[in-house]
């Protein structure tokens, strides 16, 4: 007996169309305006929820979504035991961004996922151009006045550029279409990232792109030092100075990172189970600040695992590690899927870059960066769906 697909309700069809359109709007604006992106996320999430309620379907997501949901639950528990629960619970509003995973998983399935990655790369290229203009024309060319592109802070800007570089390299190495566009915009992305003078993002981009080159062909990894050497040859003095300061303990920011590491270990020792609570590091840091510290206070510890453990406790760190392992294992498996391979490579590169850069910056707590990361690691799982169901 032949099964005939039932026509979709026009109301549900319009709801899904609005959800898809607002998701595209979110992907297009998250590198420019966090406010606009969050508005689009709110509308898209409402459409996603309305469709699930109307169809009485269960919430679906990639395997890593469930550890991520558990991480949200542990975070809320930590907020309840915080030194100031009211402040910590308010800070937990960022957990709303985790809804991006099931929303992207449902609305960006199949070939739509490739379109979303194209938007990410294209918007990233425009953002890189803005940053280059800031550097070359508006004199955002030193540590006291650093280019921030289309975002509010150079750390956020460099972090998003880092992820878009991974997306471009992945499409160039593993894609079957739009490779020329990725090759065209990649130099601008690399130049813009270099000019941000952000060492952690440099290391993250090198790690993410290096892993992708290694997966494609181990001989291609020789390109990383070659590109780095070429950049140094033509680099302005300020950039060369930043490169030379890597690992130099006489550099004040490097020395302060070490002091934050010592303070974070002490905080974890005193608050191992639930931490001091979200958004509480700035309140307790002066009590744990070592004599070698440069800054009188720091709102976070510039290290993702350290920040999570000190702020939310060791159980939260353990759940976060499960999320990371689950995401990377799933992305690795999807490298074998022809339709999802370029997207899986982009997601894998993004995760490696996040982890590498996250040793010197709390990028997982940056909303703009987190939104882009979550979209990129969910797209390959959405691409591997056929007719709304996983293959």
Image: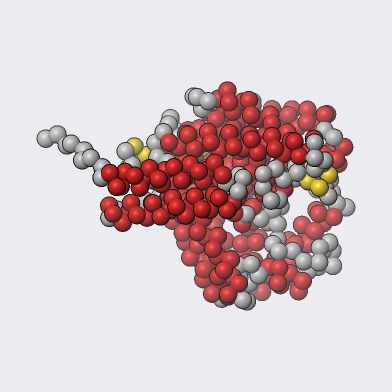
Say which of 82 and 32 sits in front: 32
Say which of 116 and 136 sits in front: 136
**x 54%, y 74%: residue:** 80
**x 59%, y 37%: residue:** 123
> In the rendered view of the protein, which quadrant contains the C terminus?
top left
**x 53%, y 33%: residue:** 118
Taking 96 as reference, is 328 above or below it? above
Q: Is residue 348 visible?
A: no
Image color mode: secondary structure
23 lies left or right of 187? left
99 lies left or right of 356? left
| Residue 179 position in % (x across, y down) | 55, 25
- How many marks on residues? 0
| Residue 166 position in % (x across, y down) | 60, 37
| Residue 286 position in % (x across, y down) | 77, 71
| Residue 277 position in % (x across, y down) | 61, 70
- Identity of the residue furthest to the left in this view: 1
Say which of 301 and 234 sits in front: 234
Q: Is residue 55 visible?
A: yes
Residue 256: quarter of image? bottom right
**x 69%, y 51%: residue:** 152
Taking 359 as reference, is 180 above or below it? above
Residue 149: quarter of image? top right
> In the rendered view of the protein, which quadrant contains the N terminus?
top left
């Amino acid at each position: 007996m032949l099964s005939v697909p039932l026509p979709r309700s026009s109301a549900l069809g319009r709801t899904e169309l609005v959800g898809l359109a607002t998701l595209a709007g979110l992907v297009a604006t998250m590198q420019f305006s966090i406010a606009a992106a969050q508005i689009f996320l709110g509308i898209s999430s409402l459409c996603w929820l309305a469709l699930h309620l109307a169809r009485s379907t269960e919430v679906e997501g990639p395997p890593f979504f469930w550890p991520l949901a558990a991480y949200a639950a542990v975070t809320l528990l930590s907020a309840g035991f915080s030194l100031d629960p009211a402040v910590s619970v308010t800070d937990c509003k960022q957990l709303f961004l985790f809804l991006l995973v099931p929303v992207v998983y449902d609305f960006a399935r199949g070939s739509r996922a490739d379109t979303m990655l194209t938007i990410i790369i294209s918007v990233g290229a425009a953002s890189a151009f803005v940053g280059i203009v800031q550097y070359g024309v508006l004199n955002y060319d030193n540590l006291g006045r650093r280019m921030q592109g289309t975002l509010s802070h150079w750390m956020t800007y460099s972090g998003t550029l880092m992820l878009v570089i991974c997306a471009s390299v992945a499409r160039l190495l593993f894609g079957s279409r739009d490779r020329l566009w990725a090759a065209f915009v990649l130099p601008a992305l690399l130049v813009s990232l270099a000019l941000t003078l952000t060492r952690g993002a440099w290391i993250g981009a090198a790690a993410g792109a290096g892993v992708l080159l290694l997966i494609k062909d181990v001989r291609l990894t020789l390109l990383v030092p070659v590109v780095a050497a070429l950049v140094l040859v033509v680099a302005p003095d300020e950039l060369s100075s930043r490169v030379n300061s890597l690992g130099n303990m006489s550099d004040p920011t490097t020395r302060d990172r070490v002091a934050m590491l010592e303070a974070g270990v002490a905080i974890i020792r005193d608050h191992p189970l639930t931490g001091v609570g979200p958004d509480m590091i700035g309140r307790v840091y002066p009590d744990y600040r070592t004599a070698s510290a440069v800054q009188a206070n720091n709102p976070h510890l510039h290290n993702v695992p350290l920040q999570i453990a000190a702020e939310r406790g060791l159980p939260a760190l353990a759940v976060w590690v499960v999320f990371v392992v689950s995401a990377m294992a799933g992305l690795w498996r999807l490298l074998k899927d022809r339709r999802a391979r370029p997207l899986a490579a982009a997601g894998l590169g993004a995760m490696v870059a996040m982890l590498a850069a996250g040793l010197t910056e709390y990028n997982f707590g940056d909303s703009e960066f987190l939104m882009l990361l979550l979209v990129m690691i969910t797209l390959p799982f959405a691409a591997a769906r056929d007719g709304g169901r996983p293959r």
